[in-house]
Image: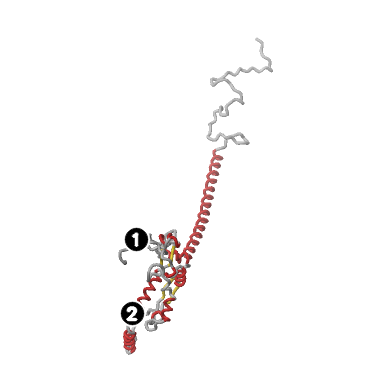
Amino acid sequence: MPFPSKNTVTTHQELPTAKGPSTSDEERHPFSDGSAITSEPNSDEEGGLSPSPSSWKDQIMQRRQHRRRGRRQMKWLLVGVLFVATNLLSGLAGAGVDRWRTNLTALCAGHTSQYCTVSHTPPVIKDVDIKYRWQNFNGSFMNEDVFRKARSPEVDAAWESMGVNYKKAIPPPPFISGMISYKEGIKSGLTDAHVQRSEKHGGGFFVNVEGLHHLHCLKLGKGAFSNSQYIVQLHALWYYEDETQSSSVAFPDFKTQHRCKNYNDIRDWAGKYQEPPAETLSDDYAKSPKKEHILAEMP
C-alpha cells in the first residue's frame, strides 16, 4: 500500500449523531446550542444578545416610575377638577341665596296666602309689587288721632280714604266686592256654590280683600255706640288727676313698630277691581244659583 504524501491530510468522515441529521448554521434553531430560554427573547440590537438581568431590572424600574408619575398626574388632575367644581358650585349657591333673598318678600306674602301653591301666584301678589316696611303705630293713650275721634265729616273722610266703603256689588251689604275669574277663584279655594257673575256678563266670582272688610266692620262697630262722651272722659280725667298727685308710675308704651305690607297699593288694587254701583246693574248680572247651593238660613 502506498504511503500518502506529506501534503496529504487524512480526515475521518464525520458521522451523524443520534440527535438526527446534521443541519447548517442557518437552519439550526437559535437555542439548539443548549442555552436557556428566557421570558424575554428579544435580543440586543447591536450585539444580537439577550439583555442581561440587570437591564431587565432597569426596565422594570423605569416602568414602575412611569406608572407612579402617571398616578401622581392623575391625582393632581382630579384635585384640579374638584377645585374648579367646588368653586363653580359655591358661586351658583351664592347666586341662588342672593336671588332667594331678593324674592323673600314675594315668598313670604305668597306663603301666607290661601291661594299659595308651588306653581301658582295669588292674584293680588301677581298684580301688586308687595313690599314690607317698618311702620310706627301711634298708640298714644291720651292724644287721639283722627281715626279715634268722635264721628264727624273729617273722621268719616279719614275712614273712607282707607277703602272701607268701596262700592258694593250684587251681594248685599256689608260685602265689598270685586271680581276675579272663575279659574282664579277655584285656585283660591272657592267652589261652584259661591256667588258668581253670569256668563253673559263675563263670569267669575264676587270677592273682596278681607282686610278691607275687617276695617269696614270696625268702622261700623265704632259708630254703633253713642254714649255721652263725658262717661269715659270723666273716668280718664279722674285717673289722670289721681296719678299726677302721686309719685311716678309705670305706663305701657303703645307706640310700637310693625312690619307692614304696602297697604295703599293693595287698597288701590281692590278699588280698581270693585264692581260698579248696584243700581247700574241688570237683574241677570248674578248667576242663578243651583237649588242645592241655596242655604236655608244665614250662616
Give the residue at the far bottom of this rendering. 245
Circles 1 and 2: CB atoms closer than 8 Å? no
Q: Residue at x 53, y 32 (%)?
A: 37
Q: Where, quadrant-wise, is the C terminus in this rendering?
A: bottom left
Dot placed on the residue nearer the N-terminal end, 1 or 2: 2
At mark 1, the secondary structure is helix
Please, is residue 291 above or below residue 243 in the view? above
Residue sitting at the far top: 1
Instruction: Report x, y in % for residue 110.
Output: 43, 64
**Residue 167 placement (x, y as % from top left):** 43, 71
Visual colour scheme: secondary structure
Q: What residue do we see at 62% from left, 36% from top?
A: 45
* Mark number displayed over residue 293: 1
Left or right: where does residue 67 sit relative to residue 161? right
Q: Is residue 133 left or right of residue 53?
A: left
Q: CA distance from mark 1 to mark 2?
A: 36 Å
Question: For residue 34, which quarter of the picture?
Answer: top right
Where is the N terminus found, in terms of image quarters? top right
Identify which residue, 133 or 126, lies in the foreground.
Answer: 126
Report which quarter residue 28 is drawn in: top right
Q: Amino acid at mark 1?
A: His
Image coords of residue 72 (percent x, y)? 52, 50
Q: Residue furthest left?
A: 296
Residue 225: assigned label: 2
| Element under disc 2 | loop
The amino acid pointed to by label 2 is Phe
